Image: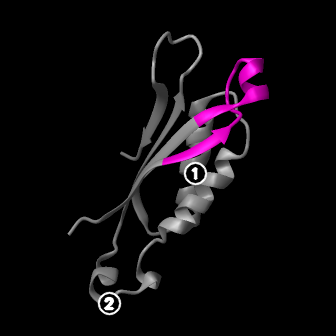
Amino acid sequence: MKSFIQIDNMRFYAYHGVMPQEQKVGNQFSVSVLIEADIELATQNDSLDDTISYADVAEVVSSEMSVPSLLLEHVAGRIYRALMARFQSISSLEVSVYKYNPPGCGETERAGVVLKSH
């Protein structure tokens, strides 16, 4: 069986952006992750030791979101690498990072970057 852990739309106020104003006043961001990992034992024995805790995943994401970057690509890459390093049982990963009301995009709700394992 394939198994996934999904956390959608974690919201953060952070200071990512190329424009000096973005770095000074910040903006709203969201992050979603889709983790493929073998969690079959957890489906049988109800033990947190046999899965990846979504609270631990959220902690990694929050830590990376607190470090300012110019580019969303850089933020997403840091989150991706940090999750892969922390959780050895991840077999594939998708990380999405979105900025709300991005400057220079007219009336756009959000713009973002998605990184996926092959």
**Which amino acid, mark 2?**
Asn
Measured from the top left, where is residue 79 in percent x and y?
Answer: 58, 48
Contact between marks 2 and 1 (CB within 8 A): the answer is: no
In the visual, does 71 lie left or right of 88?
right
Determine the secondary structure under disc 2.
helix
Q: Residue at x 48, y 66 (%)?
A: 54
Quadrant of the rendering where the C terminus is positioned: top left
Q: Nearer the viewer, mark 2 or mark 1?
A: 2
In the visual, does 40 lie left or right of 61?
left
Q: Which residues are magenta?
A: 10-28
In the foreground, 106 or 92 = 106
Give the Cα distance between marks 2 and 1. Answer: 30 Å
Q: Residue at x 51, y 12 (%)?
A: 105
Q: Residues within 10 Å of mark 1 (few under 14, many from 20)?
A: few
Q: Residue at x 61, y 58 (%)?
A: 60
In the foreground, 10 or 48 = 10
Can see residue 87? Answer: no
Measured from the top left, where is residue 83 in percent x and y?
Answer: 55, 58
Quadrant of the rendering where the N terminus is positioned: bottom left
Is residue 19 magenta-colored?
yes
Q: Residue furthest bottom?
A: 45
Measured from the top left, where is residue 36 in percent x and y?
Answer: 35, 60
Is residue 25 magenta-colored?
yes
Q: Residue at x 34, y 71 (%)?
A: 38
Looking at the image, residue 28 lies above or below residue 3:
above
Q: Which residue is mark 1?
A: 81
Q: Which residue is mark 2?
A: 45
Looking at the image, residue 79 lies above or below residue 54:
above
**Which amino acid, mark 1?**
Arg
Measured from the top left, where is residue 13 in percent x and y?
Answer: 65, 40
Report the colour scheme: one colour
Determine the secondary structure under disc 1.
helix
